[in-house]
Amino acid sequence: MNTVQSTILSIRNRINAAIQRRNQPELQHNVTLVAVSKQQPLDRIEAALLAGHKHFGENRVQEAYDKWPAFKRHFPDITLHLIGPLQTNKVEDAVALFDVIETVDRPKLAEALAKAIQKKGSTPLLYIQVNTGEEAQKAGILPRDAADFIHYCRTDLQLTISGLMCIPPANEPPAPHFALLRRLAEQHNIPLLSMGMSGDFETAVMLGSTEVRVGQALFGERQ
Ligand SMILES: *Cc1c(COP(=O)(O)O)cnc(C)c1O
């Protein structure tokens, strides 16, 4: 077993232990482990692929294009998640490569996505990123604008919104942010919740995350 493979197993075990501790009968779902491969050496990513891992996350469209088309030829059934900010001029490229786009956060971007999806005929899953900490430097729709934005995406643009995603402020306990995101998802009947990273994925799972995005705890330090 390679190192990456055994690390994936131990993270999976920690996720499963957190699932056991959820203690909320209404939470029945499993949790997807997204391996965040940004700025990681190719041999570590390859080790994860050889171990059979399927879900990967990248935060930049260009960086993803530098590595994933080649990997996808050998491992065609992987699911690639875009977890970083998306500029409107990169939307067509993103729609062509990614299976999940987690960072829909403004009307202009949603409009460009609707157009590109129609043009390309591909159907990536779309999540809305929510800036739960209302941080000026962070992407995401503000919680108070979320209802209008979700309605606009669904009704005016005919987009299916499959999930919500958040990155809590680095210097605050994450639990209230995860709870806020879950409340928003429940209010709007949105099934998927992408929350939890290397430092807080167990907390996120206990609060209802359906998908954790783990980078350095899985692959080691970024280059
Ligand atoms: C880099 C990144 C992660 C992974 O962070 P780690 O701390 O390495 O687990 C998760 N989510 C987003 C949006 C990221 O940009």
Image: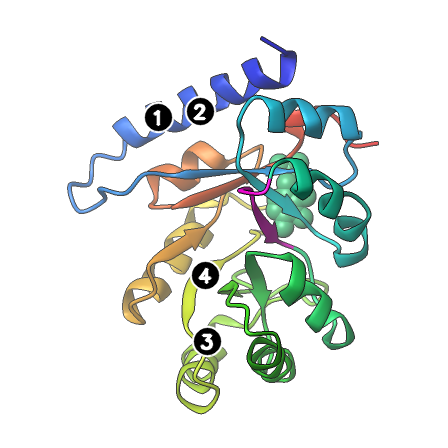
Question: Tags 3 and 1 in contact by the CB under 8 Å rule?
Answer: no
Q: How far apart in space, not on screen, are marks 4 and 3 (Cα)? A: 10 Å
Tell me the amino acid under the disc marked 3: Ala
Lower sequence index among marks 2 and 4: 2
- Distance between the alpha carbons at the discs numbered 2 and 1: 6 Å
How dense is the environment of label 3, judged by Cα within 10 Å: few (below 14), some, or many (20 and up)? many
Mark 4 Cα shell of 10 Å, populated few (<14), some (14-19), many (≥20): many
Task: Pick out the residue farthest to the front.
Answer: 73
User: Regarding ligand 1, which quadrant of the image does it lie in?
Assistant: top right
> Where, quadrant-wise, is the N terminus in this rendering?
top right
- Picture coordinates of residue 188 (x, y %)? 32, 71
Q: Nearer the viewer, mark 2 or mark 3?
A: 2
2 and 1 marks in contact (CB < 8 Å): yes
**Which residue was labeled with disc 4?**
164
In space, the residues marked 3 and 1 are separated at their CA atoms by 31 Å
Q: Are marks 4 and 3 in contact (CB under 8 Å)?
A: no
Q: Which residue is mark 2?
A: 12
What residue range appears in magenta?
76-83
Q: Residue at x 41, y 82 (%)?
A: 154
Q: Are marks 2 and 4 in contact (CB under 8 Å)?
A: no
Residue 179 locus on image (x, y percent): 37, 53
| Residue 72 in view in this figure | yes
Above or below, 17 against 97 in this view is above
Residues at marks 4 and 1 touching, judged by CB atoms closer than 8 Å: no
Q: Residue furthest bottom?
A: 156
Determine the CA span between mark 2 and mark 3: 32 Å
Looking at the rendering, in which quadrant would you find the C terminus? Answer: top right
Q: Which residue is mark 3?
A: 146
